[in-house]
Amino acid sequence: MKFLGNWWHILKTDKLLQKILTNSGYLLSSNVLSMGLSVVQSILAGRLLGVAGFGVVGTITAFASTLNRLFSFRMNELVVKYFGEASSHNQQERAAAVVKAAALGETGSAVLSFLILILLAPIAAARLADDPTTAPLFILYGSMVLANFATETSTGVLQATNKFRNYAVVNLISSILTASIIVWAFFAQRGMMEVVWAYLIGKFILGLGTAFLGWQEMNRAIGKGWWKTSFSHLPPFKELFSFAFSTNISSTIIMLVRDNEALWIALFLSPVEVGYAKTALAIINLVQVPITPFISTTYPEINRAVIKRDWTLLRRMLKRITLISGSWTGLCAIGLTLFGRWLLGFYGADFQPAYVPMLIFLIGLGFANIFFWNRPLLLSLGLPLVPYRINLYAGIAKVALAFLLVPRLGLNFEALLLSGFFVISVSLIVWRGLKEVKKREISDLEANPA
């Protein structure tokens, strides 16, 4: 009871935590509803298509997302850092120039990734989906990258300006539309084409809607002529490019190593194992959904605390949000262990083999869920190359072991490799970030003794 009383006091008195929880609440309410819809549509799609068909759809969506992110420069992180810094110092021209450059860069990368997707679609259909006739579906769904021409940039603007409510609404509308089409496809006994269209339409709504919100917010915050701002107001090009390049490389490593299990499993095993993995990860999303909004809402606050060099505030914030994420993750882990087989039963009896890999995936994903702030902390500290190097070395080890052993040891070993990657890389990034905070705090105290 004393513990609960202390937490109630903290929630009533900690204004920053209240702000984070309020902003997270907008996204969480949308995400919870979206999660419910996602579970329903996932179950119906799995029942409609079967394990192998469900695995093929997972391969198609993962392939397009991979190419899109491969050429992405994590513009949301760049915008949060540089747009946020410029806005805090009332440098409106610099803030506008950063967003303009980010949007143009993201648009160019979207066009490039779609052209490459068209060229690679036949190979992906034959090698990953084990069905050359699915190539048109790869291209069809791949058009989602064009709709997301400014999603990251717009998301960064909304993060930096604490505008989360409207984004949550667009996200919910996207989920409702996707789920509605899949429900129709299930009862109408349609096929894979309709399921792919459902996911594609949802992506178009989310991408174009987010871009519209970002444009509106820039008009409000900077002025309607912000896009005419000269690039001469940008921060030093070398610094900006270094940040964008390092976050792109780091994002690429993370994407290839940890966020594309469907493609790795499709390469080493078969669409059936992809179906098991996709199902297991869909259920684990239940654990991640409430924590995901914290990533968007805490990064700007971490960045502000670093700008102010308020290390006490920063440590207190990290401690409290970690306690929240850890408590939730622990409860969900117990729940999935006890009721995981029951949840898989909704997909069908043939999905039960996904239970063991689900629990193995949960170890690593749960650990990353608890310390979700690890990378944003180092980005705010101006150390984007640190997570890049850590993820690179851990990723090389994971991929090498996968090529050597996964074809022989199967899906459970691939799940073990992913969890090991998360535990090792996140631990090292957290340790390095906290060490840097302590170092800077000592340096400030020495420079300004009381």
Image (spheres, rainbow, N blue to C red):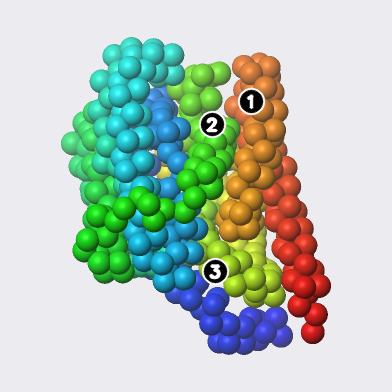
C-alpha span from label 1 to label 3: 36 Å
Task: Look at the numbered disc 2 and give the secondary structure of its residue.
Answer: helix
Q: Which residue is mark 1?
A: 399
Where residue 259 appears, x then y in whole percent?
A: 52, 37
- Apparent side of residue 210 relative to residue 3 in the rendered image (left or right): left
Residue drawn at x 73%, y 64% as measured from the top left: 440
C-alpha span from label 3 to label 2: 31 Å
Amino acid residing under circle 2: Leu
Residue 304: image tag: 3
**Which is in the foreground here, disc 3 or disc 2?**
3
Q: Are marks 3 and 2 in contact (CB under 8 Å)?
A: no
Give the answer, above or below, for where 393 lies relative to 33.
Answer: above
Task: Look at the numbered disc 1 and give the secondary structure of its residue.
Answer: helix
Q: Nearer the viewer, residue 74 or 245?
A: 245
Task: Sort mark 2 into few (<14), some (14-19) or many (20+) by Cα contacts within 10 Å.
Answer: some
Residue drawn at x 36%, y 18% as measured from the top left: 120
- Report which quarter residue 143 is drawn in: top left
Q: Which residue is mark 2?
A: 256
In which quadrant of the rendered image does the N terminus lie?
bottom right
Q: Nearer the viewer, residue 355 or 2?
A: 2
Q: Earlier in the sequence, mark 1 or mark 3?
A: 3
Q: Are marks 2 and 1 in contact (CB under 8 Å)?
A: yes
Amino acid residing under circle 1: Val
Amino acid residing under circle 3: Arg
